[in-house]
Amino acid sequence: MGLFDKIREVTRKVSEVEYNIYHEKRDYLEIYERNLELEREIAERTEELNDANKRMFTLQHIWDMMNSSTPLENVLEAIVNSTQGELGYMHCAIIRKCHDEEGDYMHVVAQSHDNLIERLNDIIGGAGIQTRRLNYSEESVFADTMKRRTIVQTKSIDLSLSAVLPDLSPEVVEKVVSNQPVKSVIVVPLTAQKKEFGWFCVFSAREELAGAEMDFLALFAKQIEMAITIADLFQVVRNQAVTDALTGLYNRRYFEEALEKEVQRAKRQKQPFSVIGIDLDYLKKINDTYGHNFGDLAIKTIADVLKSNARSVDVPARIGGEEFNVLLPGISSDGAMIAAERIRKSIESVEIDTIGHITGSLGVATYFEHSENIEELMELTDQAMYTSKREGRNRVTLAKAVSETYWQEIAVNTFIDILSKNKIPKLKHLSKELCKKLKNSDNEITKESLYSVADMLTKLYNPMHAQGSIKNKVIMAVNLAKRFDLPKEDIDNLRIAVLLYDIGNLMLPSNLLQKASPLTDKERDEIKHHPVIAVKEILQPISYIQDVLPIIEHHHENWDGSGYPNKISKEEIPLTSQIILIVDQYFALIEHRPYRSKMSSRDAIEIIKADAGKKWNENLVSEFISLIEHDIV
C-alpha cells in the first residue's frame, strides 16, 4: 500500500471516528434533553400532586366538621378560610340569595379573613361588606351562573362590585379594583335540596382557570351543598324535638329547660321573671259541637296570638291539650299582668270560621314575688289560671303568694311518720335509709324524692312496677282534676292521696299480690281490704292528712255501687277517688302483671270505655280519654 493509500485509509478511519463521536454526542444531548424534560414533568406532577393533597386535606377537614355537631356558620367559615389559606386564593366568600318584602337580595354568610377583605372594607367604609344587604340583579354574573348552573370566571371585577353595591361611586370602585393582585373572580352556584342557596366566590391572582382547578371547585361546591343540606336537616330534627307539631310553638320539654336556665339567670342577676298560664275555654264543647278539626283550629289560633305578642326573648309553649305557658324573662308581675291582658284581648278579638269567637282563662305568677321554688311557682300559675276559669273564664288572675303549708311538706312528713314509727313491719329495715332520703331533700328536689320513695315502696309489693310511674300518675291525676275546675286544696289532697293510696298493700302477704293463678274468693276479699288497712291502721293517727283519708278509703268504689269497701255509688264517691281509680286502672292495664302481659294504650282505653257508667262516671271517662289523646302527660 502506497503512502497516499495509507493517508486515505487513516483519513477514512478518522472520519468514521468523528462520525461516531458526533452521533454519540447527539444521542447524549437527546438523552440529556429528555432527562431535563422528565425532571420538569416530574416537578409539575409533584406540584399537581401537592395541590391535590391540599385539596383532599381541605375536603377531609370539611367532611369531618360536617359529621360533627359543628354549627353550619362555623363549617362555612372553615371552608372559606381553608380555601383561601391552603389553596392560595386571594379571597373566598359564600354568598346567600335571600328574599324579603322588598324582593331578592344577597348576603355574605361567610368570608375568609385576609388583607384583601380588610382593604375593601376600609375603602367602602361602614361595618363591612358582610353586614350589608347586597343588590341582586338579573343582569349580574351571579344570576347568570345560577340560571346556567355552571361555574363562571369573570375578569370584570369592577362590574361585579358595582352590581352588588350600586351605591358605590365610580371613584370608589376604581380605588377598590386598582393596585391589587386579583385578576379574576370565579363564581360557583350552590343549590341545596334542589333549591337555590347562593354562590361560592373565589378571588384569584390568575387570569385563567386550569382544567383540574375547575374540577376541584365543582367538587368543593358539592361539599358545601352537602354541608348546607346536613345543617338544614339537623335544624329540622332539632325543631321537631323542641316544638309542638300542631302549633309550631315550643313544647313542654323545651319550656322546662328554658325555665331552669331562667331561674339561674334570675338568681345571678337578682331579676324577677314571670310565667303566664293560658287555658282555652270550652275546648270540649268546641270538639263536641264542631269536631276535633275545629278544636285543633282553636288551639292553633291561640298559638298564633302568642307568637304575635311575644318578644324575641319570650318563650311561648304549648304544654299539652289546650294549655299554654309563656315565660317572660325580666318581667315583674305588673308587666306580666299587662302582657296577659293583651293576650286575652287578642284571643277574644279573633273570629274563626264556623266557631266564631273563642276565649282563654289566664293566670300569672312571678319568681321572687310569689315563690322562689320553681315547682311551686308553676303550680301557683296553674292555680291562678283555674281561678280565672272558676270565676267565669275569659279573664286574668294574679297568683297569691303561698302562706299555707305546702303539700310536699305534708307528704314528706307523712312518709317520715310512717317510717320512723315502724307502722309497716316490712319497712323496718329500710326506714332509716328512706327517712334520710326524704330529710336530705332540699326544696328543689323534694318532689322527685317523694316520687322515688313512693316508687320504691310500690316495688316491694309489685316487683313489675316501673320506676317513674308514680310521677306519671300524679301528673295525670292532677291534669284530669283540673278539667273539673277543682280548687287547689282538693288537688293538693289528690296529689298526696296518689302517693299513699295503695300503701295498705304493704300489710298484705307478698305471695298473695304476686299470685299468677286465679285468686280464691277469700284471697280476693283480703285484697279488697287494703284501702281500709291504709286508712285505719296506717294513716288515721296522722292528724294533718285527715282530709286525704276519704279519697284513699273510697278509691275502689264504683259508679254503679259495685265497688268496695263500702259499696257507695255516684255522687257519694269523692271525684278525687274516682280519678285515682281510673288512673290506677289505666296504669295497671299498660303494665305487666304475673297473670298477663301489658296492654297497649289503645286497648286499655277500650276497656275503660266499656265500663263507662259502671265503674266510672261517663263524663270522667270522656275527659280521661281526651286527656290521653292530647298526650298531656
Image (spheres, helix red, strand yellow):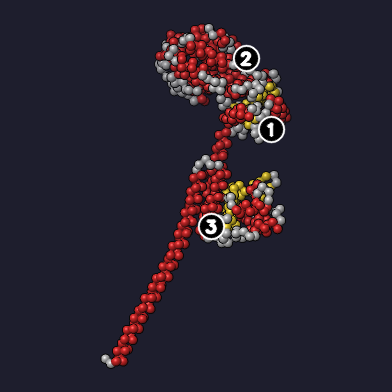
Secondary structure beneath dot 2 equals loop
**Upstream in sequence: badge 3 or badge 1:** 3
Identify residue for label 3: 214
Crowd class of label 1 (few under 14; some 14 to 19; many from 20; radius 10 Å): some
Whole-percent x, y for residue 358 in the image:
69, 27
Residue that badge 2 annotates: 404
Q: Amino acid at mark 1?
A: Asn
Tag 2–tag 3 contact (CB < 8 Å): no
Disc 1: which residue: 309
First in residue order: circle 1 vs circle 2: 1
Give the residue at x 49% y 47%.
Answer: 61
Q: Position of residue 311 (x, y in %)?
A: 67, 34
Counting from the top left corner in percent of width and height, residue 493 is at 58, 14
Q: Residues within 10 Å of mark 2 (few under 14, many from 20)?
A: few
Q: Is residue 303 left or right of residue 28?
A: right
| Residue at the image position 61 percent from the left and 34 percent from the top | 248
Q: Distance of mark 1 from mark 2, alpha carbons?
A: 35 Å
Q: Is residue 569 above or below residue 195?
A: above
Q: Amino acid at mark 2?
A: Glu
In this orientation, which residue lies closer to the viewer: 519 or 47? 47
Q: Nearer the viewer, mark 1 or mark 2?
A: 2
